[in-house]
Image: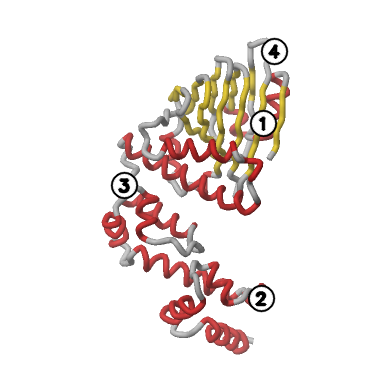
């Protein structure tokens, strides 16, 4: 966690450019001050609370081109008001409303009123599992309480900021993934409300697969939880997977076994115990893991290792 104070807009420009991406900041208000509290989580995901006077923040065309940044930012307004301009659209923010914007394109944050208080979530684009065209279409639009899951998302990020001093390294690791997942779900809900056409079966299927891949190590991962995370019925979820020839459970099981095989292959270097591999693949006990592995590969994990070693010797 890091905190910093700025007593002039130039100092704030330097601080904000370091914390986020290179920016151009201006303010006509006398006696400008700003305060930032940043909370790094994991995988490039971070949260920051910003309190400042009236401010204009611009990501110019030149800055966007010069920088290699491709992350996404979401501003959640807590107090006062402001506008987010991107792609020729304007998102008007009041307390409780949010807006998404992408750092690889120019944008403008116009906050002309005093008492600015907002939370900014930074997420690498790849963590969301959404198509670039969909992301761009959602930028510069107001996300308010009418978006399913938005109120819960707002409470979640505010809770992290409020309890930042108690966060352990393990909590940060988990919260980074959860934050990305919750934002992706909120954005999919937003896309569905707008009727963009992007929230179709193929998009939902890819989102479901991405969610499964991210939670392979979670023994509580199941069809009910997956359906709830995607805000669809279990029947709809099975319908989505019917085109692939696999059920959701079969898809998760196959990925877990492939992950197990890769961990077993690395065992000569890692010395990872079989029970640890089972846990990493989402199994609560070794016996169930071994039985599932045998069904997939017609041998036990130990036998698989021996066969792999024999194959290496024959190759030599």
- How far across and how far down the image is residue 251, in percent? 39, 66
| Residue closer to the observer: 152 or 188 | 152
Left or right of 224? Residue 11 is: right
Element assignment for label 1 = helix
- Report which residue position mark 2 lands on: 271
Helix, strand or loop under label 3: loop
Question: Disc 1 versus disc 2: distance between alpha carbons?
Answer: 43 Å
Left or right: residue 147 compared with residue 12? left
On screen, 29 above or below 48? Answer: above
Which residue matches tag 1? 17
- Total numbered circles: 4
| Placement of 282 over or under 268, stated as above or below | above
Q: Quadrant of the N terminus?
A: top right
Residue that mark 3 sits on:
200
Q: Which mark is residue 78?
A: none
Occupied quadrant, residue 65: top right
Tell me which residue sits at (54%, 39%) in the image.
159
- Looking at the rendered image, the disc whose residue lies closer to the viewer, 4 or 3, is 4
Mark 4 falls on what kind of element?
Answer: loop
Q: CA distance from mark 3 to mark 2?
A: 44 Å
- Pick whichever of labels 4 and 3 is earlier in the sequence: 4
Q: Is residue 263 above or below residue 72?
A: below
């Amino acid at each position: 966690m890091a905190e910093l104070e700025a007593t002039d807009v130039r100092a704030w420009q330097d601080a904000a450019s370091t914390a986020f991406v290179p920016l151009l900041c201006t303010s006509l208000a006398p006696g400008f001050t700003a305060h930032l509290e940043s909370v790094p989580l994991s995988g490039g995901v971070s949260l920051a609370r910003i309190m400042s006077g009236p401010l204009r923040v611009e990501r110019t065309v030149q800055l966007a081109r010069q920088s290699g940044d491709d992350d996404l930012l979401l501003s959640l307004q807590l107090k006062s008001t402001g506008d987010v301009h991107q792609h020729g659209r304007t998102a008007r923010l009041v307390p409780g409303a949010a807006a998404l914007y992408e750092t690889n394109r120019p944008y403008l944050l116009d906050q002309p009123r005093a008492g600015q208080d907002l939370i900014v979530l930074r997420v690498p684009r790849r963590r969301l599992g959404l198509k670039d065209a969909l992301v761009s279409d959602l930028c510069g639009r107001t996300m308010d309480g009418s978006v399913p899951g938005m109120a819960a998302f707002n409470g979640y990020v505010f809770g992290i900021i409020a309890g930042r001093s108690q966060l352990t390294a393990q909590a940060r690791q988990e919260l980074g993934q959860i934050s990305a997942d919750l934002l992706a779900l909120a954005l999919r809900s937003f896309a569905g409300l707008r009727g963009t056409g992007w929230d179709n079966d193929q998009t939902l299927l890819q989102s479901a697969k991405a969610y499964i891949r991210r939670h392979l190590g979670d023994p509580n991962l199941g069809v009910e939880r997956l359906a709830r995370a995607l805000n669809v019925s279990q029947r709809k979820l099975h319908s989505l997977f019917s085109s692939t020839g696999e059920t959701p459970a079969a898809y998760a099981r196959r990925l877990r076994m492939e992950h197990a095989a890769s961990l077993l292959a690395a065992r000569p270097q890692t010395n990872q115990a079989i029970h640890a591999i089972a846990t990493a693949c989402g199994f609560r006990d070794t016996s169930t893991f071994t039985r599932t592995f045998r069904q997939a590969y017609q041998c036990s994990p130990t036998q698989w290792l021996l066969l792999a070693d024999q194959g290496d010797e024959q190759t030599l």
